């Protein structure tokens, strides 16, 4: 068994209708990382994105399942490298600074580097700015740690990270899943502020705040339930308990005054909610043990992947 003499770097670009920018993005990454292999994963583009990327010298592969999450899942599965640099193909990320993302991983300091976006008001639609702040606060509250920008699409990963990441998201919630995986598994990470540019005229963002926002929130809640089930079900239990108590107090007052046990529907509902509260708490304790075992299994999987390809 022998390790390759030089690390293999792959630039992986998910692409959907980016004919206006794809050639320039490939050119910029080739200048920044001349030793890297560049892969474009085309997600059913209706324009000439795939052909232009192929002419620019990139390896082009097609992903039929629509959605950025499906594309990232396929990229991580198919591409073999030691370091992966992922960016959008819309030209909004600064490819000239790609080396800054790669070097900390090459040095063995971290397993992932995140480019946190700094841009003008025109670069960020108002809905995106608001959603980013809200979701960052929610993630910090749930997981106790924070990343400055959980939605950035400009990241670098070690082989260990890529080959142990269990991608389940289908659409633009993939960045949320990546960020929460980092926080939950306590993976060494570095954040580097980088400029976020405006899209060229004629280029349209595929992320829609009001369409994709609820989906991202549901992803956060799902991952909260799966990684912190005791906390998740404790909140549900508390909600049932408070509601049950609120319904029961007037009944207790009636019993104290009359000495009669109320048999009205409110009493039945209050009792049912109290039962649900207890069941939720029990479910939280049981699933917490399961989640702990799952976290340990995923971490062992992460540790089992060599940081470099072995030939």
Image: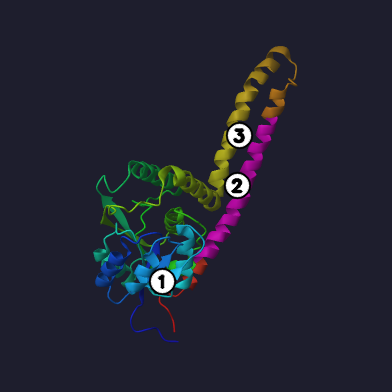
What is the distance, in whole Å, between disc 1 and disc 3 at their CAs? 53 Å
Tell me, for residue 60, which label it has, or none. 1
**Residue 196 lies in quadrant:** bottom left
Q: Going from the N terminus, do you reach mark 1 or mark 2 first?
A: 1
Q: Going from the N terminus, do you reach mark 1 or mark 3 first?
A: 1
Residue 17 to residue 208: above or below: below
Count of numbered tags: 3
Q: Residue at x 68, y 36 (%)?
A: 275
Let me know if residue 284 is in the magenta part: yes
| Residue 84 seen in the current view | no
Expressed as whole percent of the image width and height from the top left, the position of residue 195 reads 25, 55
Q: Quadrant of the C terminus?
A: bottom left
Are discs 1 and 3 less than 8 Å apart at CB? no
What is the distance, in whole Å, between disc 2 and disc 3 at their CAs? 14 Å
Q: Residue at x 40, y 63 (%)?
A: 14
Mark 3 highlights which residue?
Answer: 240
| Residue 115 seen in the current view | yes
Q: Which residues are magenta?
A: 271-299
Mark 2 highlights which residue?
Answer: 284
Let me know if residue 86 is in the magenta part: no
Q: Residue at x 69, y 23 (%)?
A: 266
């Amino acid at each position: 068994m022998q390790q390759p003499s030089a690390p293999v770097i792959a630039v992986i670009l998910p692409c959907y209708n980016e004919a206006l920018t794809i050639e320039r993005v490939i050119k910029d990454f080739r200048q920044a990382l001349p030793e890297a292999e560049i892969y474009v994963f085309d997600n059913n583009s209706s324009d000439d994105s795939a052909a232009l990327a192929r002419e620019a010298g990139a390896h082009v592969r097609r992903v039929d399942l629509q959605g950025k999450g499906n594309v990232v899942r396929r990229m991580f599965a198919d591409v073999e490298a030691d370091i992966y640099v992922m960016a959008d193909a819309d030209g909004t990320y600064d490819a000239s600074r790609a080396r800054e993302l790669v070097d900390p991983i090459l040095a063995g300091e971290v397993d992932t580097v995140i480019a946190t976006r700094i841009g003008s008001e025109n670069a960020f639609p108002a809905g995106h700015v608001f959603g980013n702040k809200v979701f960052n606060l929610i993630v910090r509250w749930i997981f106790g740690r924070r990343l400055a920008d959980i939605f950035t699409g400009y990241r670098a990963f070690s082989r260990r990270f890529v080959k142990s990441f269990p991608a389940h998201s289908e659409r633009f919630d993939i960045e949320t899943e990546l960020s929460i995986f980092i926080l939950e598994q306590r993976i060494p990470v570095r954040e580097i502020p980088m400029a976020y540019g405006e899209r060229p005229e004629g280029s349209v963002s595929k992320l829609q705040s009001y369409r994709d926002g609820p989906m991202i929130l549901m992803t956060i809640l799902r991952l909260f339930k799966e990684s912190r089930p005791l906390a998740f079900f404790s909140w549900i239990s508390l909600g049932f308990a408070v509601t049950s108590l609120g319904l029961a107090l007037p009944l207790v007052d009636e019993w104290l005054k009359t000495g009669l046990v109320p048999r009205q529907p409110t009493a039945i509902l209050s009792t049912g909610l109290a039962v649900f509260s207890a069941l939720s708490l029990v479910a939280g304790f049981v699933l917490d043990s399961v989640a702990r075992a799952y976290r340990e299994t995923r971490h062992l999987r992460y540790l089992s992947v060599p940081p470099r390809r072995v030939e």
